[in-house]
Image (spheres, rainbow, N blue to C red):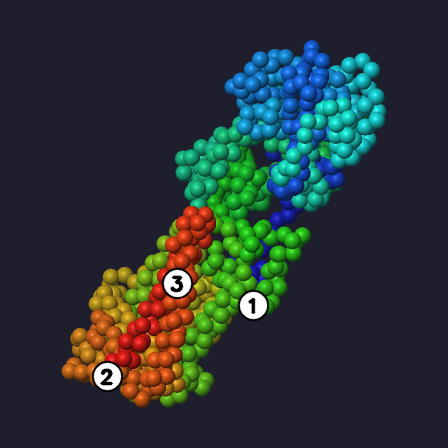
């Protein structure tokens, strides 16, 4: 609300609202009835501190400096000798504590080193259990020893290997991450006679404490070949901060593969489009290889699963509390203690928030919606699941377009995080700079689909932009005579009608130019919005308002307001009102607060119908590009546009002359132009004003004397006589000294770029930076040489 989002706040919903809860229960029961929800024993991300399964989104991969341990697994039938490689096979692992649950050793089918061992067995060190050597493509011959231990109950990849080879799943950890060996039937069942002592000694130890003891024993018996430092990614719970365990447990699952098929077809056919389009590839890769979706959580808060268990281990799923088991009739029922993953209810959001299943009035009116705006990091967790649920329960897609925003990161590229302390509070930024400043500054730095590197300076830029807009409107009020003091001396505060009719006969070339630039801006804005390129839209607004309107048109218009032609003043004000009223509407999506204030303060709402801008700018018609009839009526042609562009270029060249000669802005100067075409008196006044010149002379036969700087432009040759403006000798000495410094700096960079040891070893961006640095120094040198040449006549 503080940011100015124009949502229908009466429709705020919370996932645990009664209506949404009924939708969740209905969906669960129906999917279970269809066999698309079921209970299964599989590996999940398990948080040993929070004691619950968690989603992939709640897992943070953190780089950890650890170790890679190489273990010798004795071959069955051979007397183990740590000095004889033919008696064992070496496996590498980062988690030696899970070896107690190993079910096999895997080697690649094409790895000739181990081909003769496939089908044979090893004896698991310390444990004594006999496990097979299997051939599986999961093993990478290039990594470690090329042989890997397979622990199906403690690794997601190993779980799949185990399924392919029908290996036993032996879990050796409990919910809190401690070794659970005593009373563990799966573990004890496969042990040789008399080897239970290890189970009793290690039982109950925390996984990391057990790791130390297991490694010590492996080393004592010669099973530890070597240890190497190893930096690798380790999963951590984003809430608990502890290392996550792949854990074998009974959970509820959704058959996502079946539900995914219409959702895949919707995006592939273009019924649902992604912006940017490149996210479609990511979507397809995940959806076409989708795994069963674990939807149960062991938390105290959430939608409780509508399932009941009897003492015969039957399950009854029902929308209402059942009185007896649906399968055996037992009345001894207990409610399932698990709750649903929050993404399960979120998947129903497009229709559950509209009253489904209780009332479909709003569903019929609004479903499917047009656009979903979201972050790309939840394509799978939310976007895909909403599409799946939409087709399953509504028979149609939930939205036609998905616009993926970037993620706001800090200047180092890190995600915003409370623990890192790099996440600014938007409310604090609003209090400091204003909501409009935060909106505009952020959007201007947000390229389509790319991450945003947050910098408070962008918000400050947004505030400066708002100030500029306010002052531009204030200028119109001042020169239009609202009783406020004029913005510049010499401007009489005459009162002119707001949004008066524009007289085509009184339009200056500047008026026509700014109207054509407005037309261009509207067209660019419409294209940017259609393509969801909001940073392009803000870029257009910035260029049009700050540069074209303020820097050029407003400054040029002062030539009219300094004059005595009241009719011309009134017409220029009419043009300003026309441009500003359109501009405020173009800005409104980005700057809702200041534009609403200015819309009313400028009087633009007064003659508008209530539902078309009279009540609020939100209802004002969106600006339309200027059509051919409009352009014809007001005589807007490309010739006027080209002429003003050429005149502005002449001004830029003249300003560069002053800068090159190092003439202070306070010094009075005179320019002479030898025109290439006739210049109207009004344009001569504009040139004098924009060049901040005391005098501006038009002379077709001017012959420059010594110490005169000159440039050639499309409208003619521009001259700046330097006599009396500068101390020639002192300025020459200063410029020569500056040139020496520039050439010395350029030589340093050239020397680096001439050194192959530098150019061939540095990253491409560093090399490009040095080349740009050389080009900058050379450009500065050319500038100083030009100034010296002018001084030397």
Look at 21% across and 67% down and name the residue there: 639
Q: Nearer the viewer, mark 2 or mark 1?
A: 2
641 relative position to 134: left or right? left
Residue density around tag 1, few if under 14, some if 14–19, many if 20 or more, within 10 Å: some
Residue 470 spot, x, y in % from top left: 47, 73
Q: Nearer the viewer, residue 179 or 108?
A: 108
Badge 2: few (under 14), some or many (20 or more) residues near its Cα, within 10 Å?
few
Q: Which residue is mark 2?
A: 706
Q: In which quadrant will I find the N terminus? A: bottom right
Q: Residue at x 68, y 20 (%)?
A: 83
Measure the alpha-carbon separation of dots 2 and 3.
33 Å
Label 1, label 3: how many angstroms apart (C-alpha)?
Answer: 45 Å
C-beta proximity under 8 Å, tags 1 and 3: no
Quadrant including the C terminus = bottom left
In the picture, the disc for residue 747 is 3
Residue on which the image places disc 1: 433
Ranked by sequence position, the earlier of labels 1 and 3 is: 1
* Residue lying at the far left of the rendered structure: 701
Secondary element under disc 2, as helix, strand or loop, is loop
Which is more N-terminal, label 1 or label 2? 1
- Check contact, mark 2 vs mark 1: CB within 8 A: no
Q: Is residue 117 visible?
A: yes
Count of marks, rendered view: 3
Q: Residues within 10 Å of mark 3 (few under 14, many from 20)?
A: some
Name the mark on residue 404: none
Which percent across, then down, holds residue 675?
A: 19, 77
Residue at mark 2 to residue at mark 1: CA–CA distance: 53 Å
Q: Given this view, does label 1 or label 3 mark the residue nearer the observer?
A: 3
Where residue 29 sits, quadrant-wise, is top right
Q: Secondary structure at mark 1?
A: helix
């Amino acid at each position: 609300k503080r940011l100015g989002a124009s949502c229908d706040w009466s429709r705020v919903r919370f996932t645990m609202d009664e209506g949404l809860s009924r939708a969740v229960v209905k969906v669960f029961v129906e999917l279970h009835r269809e066999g698309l929800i079921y209970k299964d024993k599989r590996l999940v991300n398990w948080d040993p501190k929070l004691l619950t399964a968690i989603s992939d989104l709640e897992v943070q991969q953190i780089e950890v400096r650890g170790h890679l341990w190489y273990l010798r697994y004795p071959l069955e039938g051979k007397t183990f000798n740590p000095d004889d490689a033919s008696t064992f096979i070496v496996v590498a692992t980062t988690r030696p504590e899970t070896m107690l649950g190993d079910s096999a050793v895997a080697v690649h089918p094409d790895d000739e080193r181990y081909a003769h061992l496939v089908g044979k067995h090893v004896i698991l060190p310390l444990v004594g259990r006999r496990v097979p050597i299997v051939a599986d493509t999961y093993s990478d011959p290039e990594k470690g020893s090329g042989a890997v231990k397979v622990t199906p109950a403690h690794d997601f990849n190993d779980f799949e290997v185990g399924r392919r080879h029908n290996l036993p799943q032996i879990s050796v950890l409990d919910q809190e991450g401690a070794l659970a060996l005593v009373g563990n039937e799966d573990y004890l069942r496969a042990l040789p006679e008399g080897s239970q002592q290890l189970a009793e000694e290690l039982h109950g130890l925390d996984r990391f404490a057990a790791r130390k003891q297991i490694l010590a024993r492996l080393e004592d018996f010669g099973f530890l070949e070597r240890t190497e430092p190893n930096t690798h990614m380790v999963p951590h719970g984003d809430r608990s901060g502890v290392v996550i365990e792949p854990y074998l447990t009974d959970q509820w699952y959704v058959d996502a593969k079946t539900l995914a098929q219409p959702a895949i077809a919707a995006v592939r056919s273009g019924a649902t489009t992604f912006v940017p389009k490149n996210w479609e590839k990511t979507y397809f890769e995940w959806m076409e290889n989708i795994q069963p979706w674990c939807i149960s959580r062991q938390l105290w808060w959430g939608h409780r699963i509508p399932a009941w268990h009897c003492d015969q281990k039957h399950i009854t799923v029902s929308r209402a509390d059942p009185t007896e088991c649906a399968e055996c009739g037992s009345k001894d029922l207990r409610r399932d203690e698990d709750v649903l993953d929050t993404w399960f209810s979120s998947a129903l959001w497009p229709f559950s928030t509209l009253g489904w299943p209780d009332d479909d009035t709003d569903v019929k009116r609004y479903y499917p919606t047009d656009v979903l705006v979201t972050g790309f990091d939840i394509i799978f967790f939310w976007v895909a699941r909403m599409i799946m649920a939409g087709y399953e329960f509504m028979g149609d897609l939930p939205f036609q377009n998905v616009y993926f925003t970037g993620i706001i990161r800090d200047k180092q590229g890190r995600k915003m995080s409370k623990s890192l302390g790099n996440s600014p509070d938007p409310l604090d930024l609003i209090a400091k700079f204003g909501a409009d400043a935060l909106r505009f500054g952020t959007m201007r730095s947000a390229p389509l689909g790319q991450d945003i590197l947050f910098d408070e300076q962008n918000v400050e830029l947004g505030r400066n932009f708002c100030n500029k807009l306010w002052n531009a409107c204030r200028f119109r009020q001042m020169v239009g005579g609202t009783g406020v003091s004029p913005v510049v001396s010499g401007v009489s505060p005459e009162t002119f009608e707001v949004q008066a009719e524009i007289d085509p006969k009184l339009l200056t070339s500047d008026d026509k130019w700014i109207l054509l630039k407005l037309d261009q801006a509207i067209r660019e804005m419409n294209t940017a919005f259609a393509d969801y390129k909001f940073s392009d839209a803000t870029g257009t607004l910035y260029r049009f308002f700050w540069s074209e309107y303020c820097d050029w048109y407003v400054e040029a218009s002062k030539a009219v307001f300094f004059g005595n032609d009241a009719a011309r003043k009134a017409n220029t004000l009419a043009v300003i009102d026309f441009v500003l009223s359109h501009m405020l509407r173009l800005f409104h999506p980005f700057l809702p607060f200041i534009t609403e204030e200015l819309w009313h303060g400028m009087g633009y709402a007064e003659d508008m119908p209530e539902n078309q801008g009279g009540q609020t700018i939100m209802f004002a018609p969106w600006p339309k590009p200027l059509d051919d009839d409009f352009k014809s009526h007001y005589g807007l042609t490309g010739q006027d546009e080209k002429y003003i562009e050429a005149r502005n270029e002449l001004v830029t060249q003249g300003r560069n002359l002053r800068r090159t000669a190092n003439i202070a802005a306070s010094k009075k100067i005179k320019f002479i132009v030898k025109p290439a075409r006739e210049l109207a008196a009004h344009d001569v006044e504009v040139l004098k004003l924009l060049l901040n010149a005391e005098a501006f002379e038009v002379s077709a036969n001017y012959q420059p004397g010594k110490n005169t700087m000159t440039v050639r432009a499309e409208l003619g040759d521009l001259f700046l006589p330097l006599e009396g403006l500068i101390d020639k000798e002192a300025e020459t000495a200063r410029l020569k000294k500056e040139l020496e410094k520039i050439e010395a700096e350029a030589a340093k960079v050239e020397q680096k770029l001439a050194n192959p040891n530098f150019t061939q070893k540095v990253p491409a961006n560093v090399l490009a930076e040095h080349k740009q640095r050389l080009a900058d120094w050379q450009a500065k040198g050319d500038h100083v040489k030009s100034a010296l040449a002018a001084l030397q006549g």
